[in-house]
Amino acid sequence: MLLVSALAVIYTKYSSRLIFIEIQKQEKALEQYEVEWGQMQLELTMLAEQNRVEEIARDKLKLAMPLHEEIIYIEP
């Protein structure tokens, strides 16, 4: 009975170490994803800036701002 109990303690300790190692790996992966998420948020902010959108519309799509008298306002 003592031998079985000792083996159970050893197995439990080994299992808990494996789980702890897996938790550490997942935490590192989570940290990496958080860094990547922050970089993507920064890139999205940069790409969505009004000046950049206007520049691309003007240069690549050959669009121009309409004159003030050409703008039609629709009231809700």
Image (cartoon, rainbow, N blue to C red):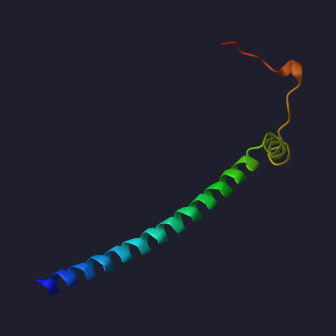
36 or 6, which lies in front?
A: 6
Instruction: Quadrant for residue 5, please give it.
Output: bottom left
Q: Residue at x 21, y 83 (%)?
A: 6
61 or 44, which lies in front?
A: 44
Q: State the residue lying farthest toward the left.
A: 1
Q: State the quadrant of the N terminus.
A: bottom left
Q: Residue at x 70, y 12 (%)?
A: 75
- Where is residue 15? Give x, y as percent: 31, 76
Q: State the quadrant of the C terminus.
A: top right
- Horizontal side, residue 40 vs residue 55: left or right: left
39 or 31, which lies in front?
A: 31
- Where is residue 74? Give x, y as percent: 71, 15
Q: State the residue lying farthest toward the bottom.
A: 3
69 or 20, which lies in front?
A: 20
Residue 67 vertical placement versus 16 (above, below)? above
Instruction: Quadrant for residue 31, please give it.
Output: bottom right
Q: State the residue lying farthest toward the front.
A: 2
- Where is residue 17? Give x, y as percent: 37, 76
- Horizontal side, residue 15 vs residue 54: left or right: left
- Where is residue 11? Give x, y as percent: 26, 80
Q: Residue at x 43, y 68 (%)?
A: 23
- Horizontal side, residue 4 vs residue 19: left or right: left
Instruction: Quadrant for residue 12, please give it.
Output: bottom left
